[in-house]
Image: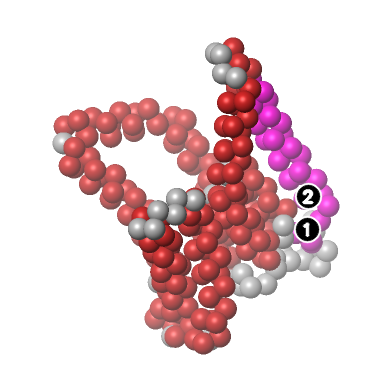
Amino acid sequence: MWSSLNFNPNSPFLFAVAGLIVAFVIAQSVFFLVKAWRRARELGLTASVLWRVVRSSAVFTIAPAVAIILGVITLSRFLGLALPWLRLSVLGALTYELPAATSTAATLGVSISEGVRDPRVYSTIAWVMTLGILSGLLIITLFLKKIQGGIEGLKKRDTKWGDIFLTAIFMGMISAFLGMIFADVTSGIRGWIPVFVMLASSLIMLVCAFFVRVLKVKWMEDYALPISMLGAMALSIPITRLLG
């Protein structure tokens, strides 16, 4: 068994395993892209129209890609680059991976400000990140049709309560993340750092919304998330120095 002295979260072996999985997923994407292109040509769409769709789709993928890269960079300081690259390239979501890794590290009594050198801690975090996200796949595969039918039935019986139900589900998800932000506010002024960073991110998002809704800067609608994330990360430095 590896000891904490020779364990390296950036080892070539981990990169090789992650690279094989990412390459397989890319191959799948290329396979379905080729089939979709051929089917579109069979339906009578011209190559110029298809290339226009490709170019516009590529542009609109830049914004979410920036947010994902930020997540990879954030997690790589703690978990190395291989695991975050794999998780956020294939199945993971930024809104899940970072809280999962952070909460697991806190449970194990490990600080996320330092890199993982214990293979047991690393494997535990990897298992939590992987098994937790798989529940969504299983629920969608086995129960999505039934869940959608129930929601549609509720909306047909009472449209108002159907909208309230969906809103409540969304707010419940947001509340789970807010719990992590407010978890340490009773520990002193440093516990308020995540709260002020969240408020800074919200303020930046409101500014972006002003540009989109009032000034009609439509391109910013797709970049509001990475802009607010980058801005909040930048402001977290002076906030931490001021309160820390």
Q: What is the three-letter code of the residue carrying label 1? A: Asn
Location of residue 195 in the rendering, given as x and y in whole percent from the top left corner: 42, 74
Camera-nearest residue between 117 and 223: 223
Location of residue 63 in the rendering, given as x and y in whole percent from the top left corner: 56, 51
Residues packed near mark 1 inside 10 Å, few (<14), some (14 to 19) or many (20 plus): some
The CA span between labels 1 and 2 is: 7 Å
Residue at position x 50%, y 37% from top? 137
Identify the image quadrant of residue 145: top left
Residue at position x 62%, y 25% from top? 48
Earlier residue among tags 1 and 2:
1
Q: What is the three-letter code of the residue carrying label 2? A: Phe
Location of residue 66 in the rendering, given as x and y in whole percent from the top left corner: 60, 54
Q: Which residues are magenta?
A: 7-35
Is residue 95 left or right of 89 when viewed as pictured?
Answer: left
Q: Name the residue carrying label 1.
A: 10
Asked if labels 2 and 1 touch by Cβ distance under 8 angstroms, the answer is: yes
Q: Name the residue carrying label 2.
A: 15
Residues packed near mark 2 inside 10 Å, few (<14), some (14 to 19) or many (20 plus): some
Identify the image quadrant of residue 46: top right
Magenta-colored segment: predominant secondary structure: helix
Q: Is residue 233 magenta?
A: no
